[in-house]
Image (cartoon, helix red, strand yellow):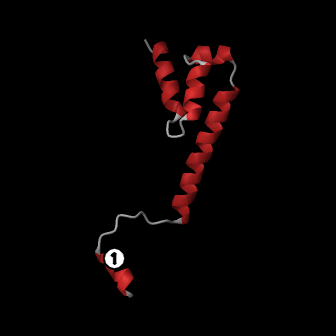
Amino acid sequence: MSALTTTAHHSGSSWPRLTWRGILRKLVVVDTLYRERADLAAMDARTLRDIGVTRADIGEALRRRDEHLRLILLRGGDQFQH
């Protein structure tokens, strides 16, 4: 074991281990998010109104990469559960 490996091992490094399985999981998540965003962007105004969101809501979410569109759909779907 080299000094660098020993130091990294004993320092309790919190770096996640990269595995092919982990990378593939992340790719699946990113692909799903991309497809959901594309599907929402392609919906017409009537369908969006039916699920309780506006074109402006979709535009805002598409500009923010860290927000998942399911949150918007869940917020819009709340009105139908009452």
- Specify the quadrant of the image occupied by residue 43: top right
What residue is drawn where x is 48% and y is 25%? 74
Quadrant for the C terminus, please. top left
User: How many numbered discs?
Assistant: 1
Which residue is situated farthest in the bottom direction here? 1
Instruction: List x then y, in percent, for residue 69.
Output: 54, 32
What residue is drawn where x is 44% and y is 66%? 17
What residue is drawn where x is 38% and y is 82%? 4
Write down the residue under mark 1. 9
Instruction: List x then y, in percent, for residue 2.
Output: 39, 87
Could you say whether the residue bearing mark 1 is in a helix, strand or loop?
helix
How many residues crowd around disc 1 within 10 Å: few (fewer than 14), some, or many (20 or more)? Answer: few
Q: Nearer the viewer, residue 8 or 29?
A: 8
What residue is drawn where x is 65% and y is 17%? 47
- Specify the quadrant of the image occupied by residue 38: top right
**Residue 20 placement, left or right of 38:** left
Which residue is situated farthest in the top direction here? 82
Q: Which kind of residue does numbered mark 1 sit on? A: His
